[in-house]
Structures are given as structure tokens and as C-alpha cells.
Image: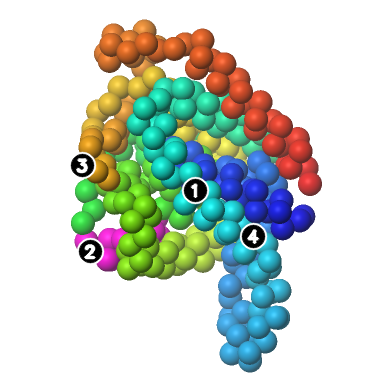
Amino acid sequence: MSSLGVFLRGMLMGAADIVPGVSGGTMAFITGIYDTLLGSLRSFDLDFLGRLFRLDIRGAWQHVNGGFLLALLLGIGTSIFSLARLISWILANHPVPLWAFFFGLILASAVVLLRQVEGWNLPRALCLVAGATTAGMIAFSPAANMDFGLAGVFLSGFLAICAMILPGISGSFILVLLGMYGTVLVAVKSLDLVFLLVFIAGAAAGLLCFSRLLYWLLNRFHQATMAVLTGFLFGSLVIVWPWKHVLDWVQGSHGQLKAARQIPVSPTEYAALTGLEPAIFLCVALMVLGFAVVWLIDYSWGRD
């Protein structure tokens, strides 16, 4: 796989994780780099540290598949810093069409994962239901207001990055539930280095811990774990349903109110509750487009 291909996959992951409810882990999975990513992350072990202490920089770099990780991180970073303002603006001004597009994207992603689960039986079906139920419970959880200084920033990074690895549960959505989404966006836009370094340290710790657990589960209980991950995706569809009724609000980066907890409603209920046009035909078209994009990505990249 070329460095450019990995970079572009990283940009897809970064763009997905900006939007609350869309997972970068989903993008990694459907573009065929999920196993490589987990394997690279778990390679930060004692062997890696031993190579560093012996000043075997080249050996340490090869041990963790450094070229792959560098290209991927550059893609994620490029996407986040270049698209944060644009996607924030679209979410604020045209949320329903954007959510419709992502609904199609997530639905197609769930179907892609579903096809990879083999030998369906009752335990695997229960794993699927458990994953969907967990995602739904997270979706309807009330938003918190985390304010523990730099320790809270570290914990936010730790939890958000764990969600980022999981297909179906986005790091941005976890930040919304923690009440940190607007704060993190402000830090990115203003380049608050202290905040960002602490957040990145928490994310790094979360990556190293959770990637090992997930890698172990995929190797020991692959089909059951795949069923749970597929359930996460199906359960997360309630998060990205275009027409929603807001139950809770959080304060955004500039003092404005942002939706934190919402429930899905029908297009007609949405129109009655908000007085806004549900744009049904446009949303259906965007759902189909999102579905088609994922199938195209899976066809061209998922089989590399």
C-alpha cells in the first residue's frame, strides 16, 4: 500500500471524526487498514523501547511500521485542521442534509461489516444485539460537563480516542457527552498548545491501551468481536438519523448552544416541532449517495 493511499485514508478518518456520530474507525475498517492500524499500535511495546534505548532508531521505526503510522497521522491531522471550520459551518447551517449523507454512509458501512461475519449462530446474534444496544444507550446518554482542569483534558483525550478506534462510536460524540466538544474545537482553532499537548497525551495513552485489548479480542474471538462491532454501527444509526428532536443542549465554542442529546423523529414530526422544511427528497438522495460512496470505497480500497 502506497504512502499516498494511507494518507488519503487518514484524511477520511480525520474528516469522519470531526462530526459527532461518525467514526474514524469505520473509515479505517472499510478502507482495509483496520488490522494494520491495530497491529502497528500494539507494536509500541518493550521490544520497541529496547530498540530505542539501544539507539536502534531504524529498527524501532520498522518495528512499529512507522511509515504507515506517519502517513496516516499526517492525513488525519491535515483533514482535522483543514476541514474543522468547514464541517462546523455545515453542521450549524445545513445539519439535516449532512446527517442524511452520513446516515447512508454508516448504513453501508454496517452492511459491509455484516458481510464479514461468518457462521452466524445464537451467540453471535446476541453479540450483534449487545453492540447495537450499547451504541443506542451511549446515544441517549445525557451530556456531562467535565471541568477537571488538565486532568479532565487528559481523560477526554483517552476516552475519545478509544471511541475513535471503534467502528460506529465517534470520538467527537464522546466529547459531546463529556461536555468537551466545543472546548476542543476552540483549542484546535486557536492552537492552544498546552491544552492540545495534554489532550494528545491522553489520546496516546488510550491508543496504546485500548488497541491492545481490541487486537487481542479480534485474534481470540474474531467473529464474535466482529458481530459486536457491526452492532455498534447499526446502533449508531440513531445518532446520525437526519431528523431529530433536541433534548439537551451544551454551550459551543463561541457561547452558542449545540445539541447534545437528541431523539430521532419522523420528517413530518420534525417539521411540526421545528417549523423547518424536512427536505425529504434531498435527504433520501444524499443517503443513497453516502451509501454509494462507501460501497465504492470498499470496492476500490477494501480489497487492496
Mark 2 and mark 4: Cα distance apart in space = 32 Å
Label 1 sits on residue:
82
Q: Which of the two discs, 1 and 4, sits closer to the camera? A: 1
Image height of 124 relative to 56, above or below: above
Tell me the residue at 36%/27% (across/down). 93
Which residues fall within the magenta stretch? 148-159
Q: Residue furthest bottom?
A: 54
Does residue 156 show up magenta in the picture? yes
Mark 1 and mark 4: Cα distance apart in space = 16 Å
Label 2 sits on residue:
149
The answer, for residue 117, to whether it is visible in the render is no
Label 4 sits on residue:
71
The answer, for residue 246, to whether it is visible in the render is yes
Mark 1 and mark 2: Cα distance apart in space = 27 Å
Image height of 73 relative to 298, above or below: below
Q: Which of the two discs, 2 and 4, sits closer to the camera? A: 4
What is the crowding at mark 4: few (fewer than 14 residues within 10 Å), some, or many (at least 20)? many
Mark 4: amino acid:
Ala
Label 3 sits on residue:
255
Q: Where does the image place residue 85, in percent across and percent down from the top left?
A: 41, 42
Mark 1: amino acid:
Ser
Mark 2 and mark 3: Cα distance apart in space = 19 Å
Residue 147: quadrant of the picture: bottom left
Q: Nearer the viewer, residue 34 or 235?
A: 34
Mark closer to the chain start, 1 or 3: 1
Does residue 195 show up magenta in the picture? no
